[in-house]
Amino acid sequence: MTEVPEITLNNGQRIPQFGFGVFLVPPAQTEQAVTTALAAGYRHIDTAQMYGNEKEVGEAIARSGLDRSDVYVTTKLANNAHLPDDARRAFDGSLKALGMDYVDLFLIHWPLPTRYDGDYVTTWDTLEEFYRDGRARSIGVSNFQAHHLRRLHTESEMPPAVDQIEVNPYLTQDELRGFCAEHQIAVEAWSPLGRGNVLGDPTIDDIARKYGKTPAQVVLRWHIERGDIVFPKSVSPARIGENIDIFDFQLAGDDVEAISALNRDQRTGPDPDTFAG
Ligand code: NAD
């Protein structure tokens, strides 16, 4: 079985550094995709209320024969449920859909600074309830910029365990990652392959040839060397197997740097400062 490293979060909980993302996997394909990923050795699944496939994720895990405690499960609060009572109802709904009595990690999906009077702090305080009652083993945020994190730091009690942000070789996010490192917030890199956009890059192709690996494997390994947590998505069994087959090699420091130098500050997704959900 593939040895996936673990990262210790600021609350002492451990998270596998590599997992499987199910954004845009249609519900009808989700159980099969997650089953394939679990069989290939994945033990960390990243879903969200807004993906509409929590139920199928839960079914695949239940049918896998694995213990619940052997699979790390993350889900995220929907953008229409930031008010405290809505968030409580939505969290209950996630547990019910997943068929679980706890999640490993629960995130605010987007800060939505232009909605709810810009008050993501009250939403965060509500997530703290789920942490305290044990139904979320860790809580964190997603798409938070440094200034959003700073506000949580000064106005609320608990620091987020993670910030899940868009990172790929064309969007290296070194400033925000530096802020997170300084504040013991683990970084999860979403769309680690830039949704496929970075895979035709000549520098990445050259490095891939040198190691006898595919461009996707080299990019995923680059994230691992930089210490971020990743969960690439694919519904193809061959790619699901290819993406986890990255723990038998390491990139030399200058190759990591050559890939980081491709940065163009280019997002594939929305800008968290203006995105309204
Ligand atoms: P990704 O970077 O993982 O790219 C996925 C796409 O790359 C696939 O659709 C496929 O076309 C291609 N691909 C995958 N493996 C490949 C391979 N081996 N070779 C060639 N092409 C390959 O993009 P993603 O799905 O957007 O992101 C991964 C996960 O990140 C999501 O499933 C989700 O869990 C999370 N995510 C979170 C947010 C957020 O706001 N928090 C936003 C987007 C994604």
Image: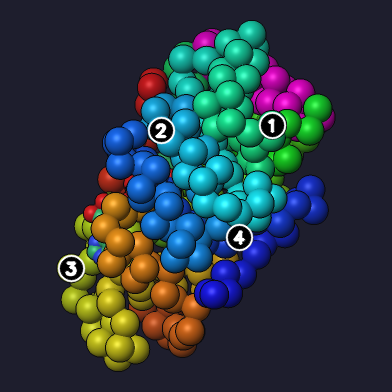
Tell me the quarter of the picture where residue 160 sits. Answer: top right
Q: Is residue 191 left or right of residue 147?
A: left
> In the structure shown, which secondary structural element does the residue marked by tag 3 occupy?
helix
- Residue assigned mark 1: 101
Residue at the image point whose x is 55% and y is 32% from the top:
98
Closer to the chain start, of discs 4 and 2, is: 4
- Residue assigned mark 4: 16
Closer to the chain start, of discs 3 and 2, is: 2
Q: Give the Cα separation between the discs numbered 4 and 3.
A: 28 Å
Q: Give the Cα separation between the discs numbered 1 and 3.
A: 43 Å
Q: Give the Cα separation between the discs numbered 4 and 2.
A: 21 Å
Closer to the chain start, of discs 4 and 3, is: 4
**Colour option used:** rainbow
Residue at the image point whose x is 69% and y is 31% from the top:
101
The magenta stretch spans which residues?
A: 116-132
Label 4: how many residues lie within 10 Å, few (<14), some (14-19) or many (20+)?
A: many
